[in-house]
Image: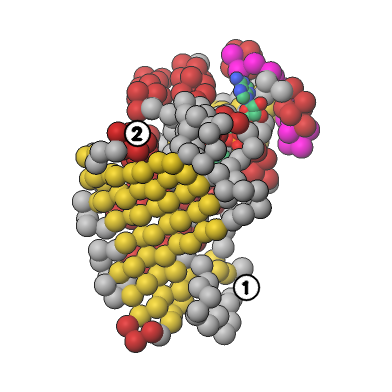
Amino acid sequence: MDEVRLAIIGAGGISQTHARAMELVKGARVTAVVDIIRSRAEALAEKLNAEHVYEDIDTALEAGGFDAVDICLPTYLHAPATVAAAKRGYHVLCEKPMAMTLDQADSMTAAARENNIVLMIAHCRRFDNYWGAFRKAILDGVIGRPVLWRSMAARLGPHQPWYLERDEGGGPLIDGAIHNYDFARAIFGEARTVYAAGQQFDLDNTAIDTGSTTVRFASGDVLVLSWSWAVPEKVTSSFQDVLGPEGVLYLSQPPHAPKPEEVPPNHGYLVVQRKGGTFDYIFYEKNDMYAAEIQAFVDAVREGRPSPLDPEDTKRSLAIATAVLESAATRRLISL
Ligand SMILES: NC(=O)c1ccc[n+]([C@@H]2O[C@H](COP(=O)([O-])OP(=O)(O)OC[C@H]3O[C@@H](n4cnc5c(N)ncnc54)[C@H](O)[C@@H]3O)[C@@H](O)[C@H]2O)c1
């Protein structure tokens, strides 16, 4: 296939990011946009010079004029849209989290297998040089092993209400934190146990809006994560580092470390503090992870290769998220 024709399904927040990334993607163009809010679909189609606009997913899938779909819908719609597209033979790039439940994830994987299509869940960090530098530093043993990755984030949640409905978006412990569960697996391997505590600061939400979890991996590495989407407007607080037996890796410039004398153009850096308090820097070339992610999907479709991210593997990241929510609900340690 010379060129992959894409239909973007869901023209809300993340689709705008995908649309910008498409400027860098080779061998693909967007020919259709679908959204129940027609004006959104029309605006995005205009931006991308896409010929077709639809309000209804089944109508779009029936009409065709594309080879693959890019699903940018709220999470609870990922499974039905993926299954419907796969059954009609379209390849599927679907936003993360894969789904709300493991059964939904299984239905997506089965539909992809039965219809011989490429299904890739858009775990963007897997394609990002910043996160790649972090992974390499840990695997190279820069701070020794095992490590403790501490990841804390708090801000007011997204304004779209489905994000904080229990069965639609599930709140930050699944929607935001899936990035960390998935990337922790990319470094550490499989998780063994999960323990979580959930809180609700805003009782209008049905999902846990604030919570903390400890995920222990078979490797002995541990992820401690805490995330809130229910602090007041304009309040933000975040913190990330990794502790190891031979030092600390900072994922951004810590206030107590000197800045590097020179940073090469278009590069970022991670900071390492070693025994004796000395600081080192790890430089990486910045890239557009969304363009790299879409390019990987497009190349697999064009070249008839398997999904760059095996959906069975991606399901294991979702299994951490569902275990975290179960642990928060039952107050029990969950084994995976
Ligand atoms: N990878 C990332 O960094 C990242 C960032 C943000 C969001 N996301 C994920 O992307 C997905 C979408 O998030 P968002 O912020 O763009 O959501 P959104 O609510 O802004 O956009 C969803 C769009 O889908 C449309 N829609 C809803 N139901 C529909 C239906 N039945 N048929 C057609 N259109 C329908 C809505 O009108 C809306 O325009 C979520 O799963 C989210 O977790 C990923």
Residue interval drawn in magenta: 44-58
Q: Secondary structure at mark 1?
A: loop
> Does the closest atom of ligand 1 sit within 8 Å of the Cβ of label 2?
no
Q: Residue at x 56, y 63 (%)?
A: 286
Q: What kind of residue is marked 2?
A: Ala
The image shows residue 186 at horizontal and vertical percentages of 35, 51
Q: Quadrant of the N terminus?
A: top right
The image shows a total of numbered marks equal to 2
Give the number of the disc on residue 329: 2
Look at 67% across and 24% down and name the residue there.
35
Q: Is 86 above or below relative to 177?
A: above
Which element is circle 2 on? Answer: helix
- Spot occupied by residue 199 in the image (x, y as percentages of width and height): 44, 41
Residue 122 percent across, percent down from the top left: 49, 40
Name the residue that disc number 1 marks.
265
Q: Position of residue 167 (x, y in %)?
A: 47, 26
Q: Residue at x 61, y 40 (%)?
A: 158
Mark 1 or mark 2, which is nearer the start of the sequence? 1
- Tell me whether the residue at label 2 lies in contact with that at label 1, contact meaning CB atoms closer than 8 angstroms: no
Please determine whether, in this image, residue 211 is positioned above or below residue 11. below
Q: Quadrant of ligand 1?
A: top right
